Image: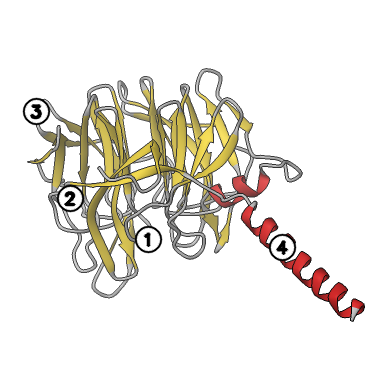
């Protein structure tokens, strides 16, 4: 009898310990909130481009699953206004940047009804004051798409990409004053397409992408003042390596700087993901934030204007989107607007 009572006591005690253990298990929380905003004025699409001049955002081109699109818009305040249509070959997965008071657009591809790809190497300038497009000298590195480009100071920088048979790891500098392309020293990493780039503290960060189906986990910092590249990837034995690898191992994502930090969101990894990670340039560390609250997608756009950051459009299989979401990194999760 005493043995039975002892066994019952041990069973009850073990259950209590389990309950206590469960009740004290910390809950993982993430910060940040997504608020749905006014949709894009044009038809749903993916592979479009954006550039920002001052506080105005310009967006256009892309593919809606059936047609290539030439329309272009400027976002002034909360209103998308139609501007001059793009006069060149229609395309998707092009690249764009702004320098001074002008925007620059080029590369990408157009596929005909037979499914053949026409890779492009042309470049165009948009002058907002004249609402006019002007064709420039062709890109010096040849035809390609899924490249990255950034404007820093008085120069544009463009590199990486794919031409249907080869991946690229080269980088080029564009000088608007002379309309010339000059090849510069490239990062000492893998060639890639579908990578992302953002500017923080006056330096360009190149992150992610893929090569021959393999997703790349690295982070390179380019300093335009001396043309040098620095490896900013977390070491494999770092306590932050797991978050770093999850955050950057994706392609056709969005990456942008906002409020002294940067963010890597959505894209393919290799399946579509809703995750977003924050990068702290002071520590080079990555931390998870609240998932994107729209549908999972790739080939979307981002822009920062009026002190706010936005992500939207893009594709998931045969679905194309026109929705736009504001990212509020300091809000608690799931707050209503």
Q: Earlier in the sequence, mark 3 or mark 2?
A: 2
Seen at 16% across and 37% down, the residue is 75
Q: Which residue is mark 4?
A: 16
- Answer with mark 4 or mark 3, whichever residue precedes in sequence: 4
Distance of label 1 from label 2 (alpha carbons): 16 Å
C-beta proximity under 8 Å, tags 4 and 1: no
Crowding at mark 4 (Cα within 10 Å: few <14, some 14-19, many 20+): few
Quadrant location of the C terminus in the rendered image:
top left
Point out residue 80 in the picture as x, y percentages from the top left corner.
12, 41
Q: Earlier in the sequence, mark 4 or mark 1?
A: 4
Residue placed furthest toward the front: 1
Q: CA distance from mark 3 to mark 2?
A: 27 Å
What is the spatial separation of the Cα atoms under label 4 and label 1, in whole angstroms? 42 Å
How many other residues sit within 10 Å of disc 3, few (<14), some (14-19) or many (≥20)? few
**The N terminus - image quarter:** bottom right
Q: Residue at x 73, y 45 (%)?
A: 236
**Left/right of residue 244 with respect to residue 36 in the rendered view:** right
Return the residue at label 2. Answer: 39
Q: Which disc is residue 130 wearing?
A: 3
Residue visible at 48% across and 52% down in the picture: 193
1 or 3: mark nearer the eye: 1
Mark-to-mark CA distance, 2 and 4:
53 Å
| Relative height, residue 257 to residue 47 (above, below) | above
Q: Please tell me which residue lies in front, 210 or 288.
A: 288
**Residue 146 or residue 274, whichever sits in front:** 274
Marks 4/3: CA–CA distance: 75 Å
Give the percent coordinates (x, y) of residue 238: 73, 41
Front: mark 2 or 4:
4
């Amino acid at each position: 009898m005493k043995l039975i009572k002892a066994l019952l006591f041990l069973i009850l005690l073990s259950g209590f310990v389990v309950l206590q253990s469960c009740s004290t298990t910390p809950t993982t929380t993430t910060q940040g909130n997504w608020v749905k905003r006014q949709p894009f004025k044009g038809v749903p699409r993916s592979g479009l481009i954006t550039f920002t001049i001052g506080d105005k955002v310009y967006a256009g081109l892309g593919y809606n699953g059936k047609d290539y699109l030439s329309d272009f818009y400027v976002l002034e305040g909360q209103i998308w206004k139609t501007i001059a249509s793009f006069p060149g070959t229609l395309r998707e997965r092009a690249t764009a940047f702004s320098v001074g008071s002008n925007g620059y657009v080029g590369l990408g591809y157009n596929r005909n009804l037979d499914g053949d790809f026409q890779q492009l190497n042309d470049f165009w300038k948009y002058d907002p004051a004249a609402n006019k497009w002007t064709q420039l000298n062709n890109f010096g590195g040849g035809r390609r798409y899924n490249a990255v480009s950034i404007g820093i100071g008085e120069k544009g920088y463009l590199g990486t990409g794919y031409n249907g048979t080869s991946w690229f790891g080269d980088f080029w500098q564009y000088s608007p004053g002379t309309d010339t392309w000059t090849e510069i020293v490239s990062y000492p990493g893998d060639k890639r397409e579908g990578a992302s780039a953002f500017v923080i503290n006056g330096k360009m960060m190149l992150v992610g992408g893929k090569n021959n189906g393999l997703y790349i986990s690295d982070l390179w910092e380019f300093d335009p003042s001396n043309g040098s590249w620095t490896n900013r990837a977390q070491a494999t034995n770092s306590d932050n390596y797991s978050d770093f690898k999850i955050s950057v191992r994706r392609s056709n994502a969005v990456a942008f700087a906002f409020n002294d930090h940067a963010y890597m969101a959505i894209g393919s990894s290799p399946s579509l993901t809703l995750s977003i990670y924050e990068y702290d340039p002071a520590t080079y560390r990555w931390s998870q934030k609240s998932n994107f609250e729209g549908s999972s997608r790739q080939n979307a756009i981002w822009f920062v204007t009026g002190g706010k950051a936005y992500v939207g459009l893009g594709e998931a299989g045969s679905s194309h989107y026109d929705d736009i979401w504001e990212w509020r990194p300091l809000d608690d999760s799931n707050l209503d607007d």
